[in-house]
Amino acid sequence: MQKILRIALVVTTCLVIGYLSSLVTKESIISWYPTINKPVFNPPNWIFAPVWTILYVMMGVAGGMIWNKLETDQENVKKAFTFFIIQLGLNALWSYLFFGLHNPFLALIEIILLWLMIFETYNQFKKIDKIAAYLLLPYLAWVSFATILNASIWWLNR
């Protein structure tokens, strides 16, 4: 039972971080975001909430799975979870930089750092539990796309 509770706690934490990030995003989606130039491959706004919800759940399950290995691999779990927490914080920060400050350039620099932290989290998770690591791959793919989108928006609006 404790294993399920750990997973549920990490999933809930990820979803709460996502929700708090959405509060910064919500106002700008209506006021600022429609006024800037976007590339032709920019997805419709409605796609972001369901995609991010799925990604936060997968990320949380992966984090919980790693936390469940604490008793058997304490050193690696602590290191992996540190990267996990850093990337989660950077994930939230991106929304503030892009939508809160309306600064695509600063957000671009930050999302590159975020991508690197997700990749390192994946590498650290892979040492402990391959399935947990694989659960991060859709997140890494989406942030790769988001990086290209962010760069394009910055370029079109510089």
Image (cartoon, rainbow, N blue to C red):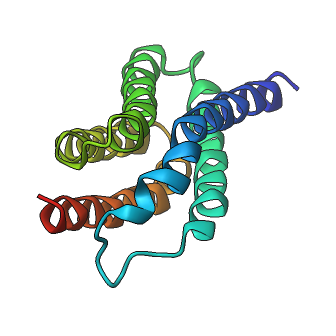
Q: Measuring 24% from the left and 49% from the top, which residue is drawn there?
A: 104
User: Above or below — where is 135 with respect to 110?
Assistant: below
Give the quarter of the image for residue 99: top left
Q: Is residue 11 left or right of residue 59?
A: right
Q: Residue at x 33, y 35 (%)?
A: 101
Asked whether residue 144 appears in the rendered view, the answer is yes
The quadrant of the picture occupied by the C terminus is bottom left
Residue at 19% from the left image edge and 39% from the top image edge: 106
Q: Is residue 156 above or below residue 74?
A: below
109 sits to left or right of 53: left
Front residue (pair 151, 68): 151
Q: Position of residue 107 (x, y in %)?
A: 26, 43
Q: Position of residue 22 (x, y in %)?
A: 59, 41
Does residue 141 appear in this view?
no
Q: Residue furthest right?
A: 1
Using the image as rendered, state which of residue 109 and residue 8 is in the foreground: 109
- Label count reads 0
State the residue lying farthest toward the bottom: 40
- Taking the image as shown, residue 134 lies to the left or right of residue 11, namely left
Quarter of the figure with residue 151? bottom left
Question: Which residue is pictured at 55% across the width and 67% down the height?
Answer: 45
In which quadrant will I find the N terminus? top right
Q: Position of residue 79 (x, y in %)?
A: 36, 20
- Residue 50: percent from left, percent from top: 67, 62
Q: In the displayed structure, would residue 152 be above or below residue 71?
A: below
Residue 19 sits in which quadrant?
Answer: top right
142 or 46, nearer to the observer: 46
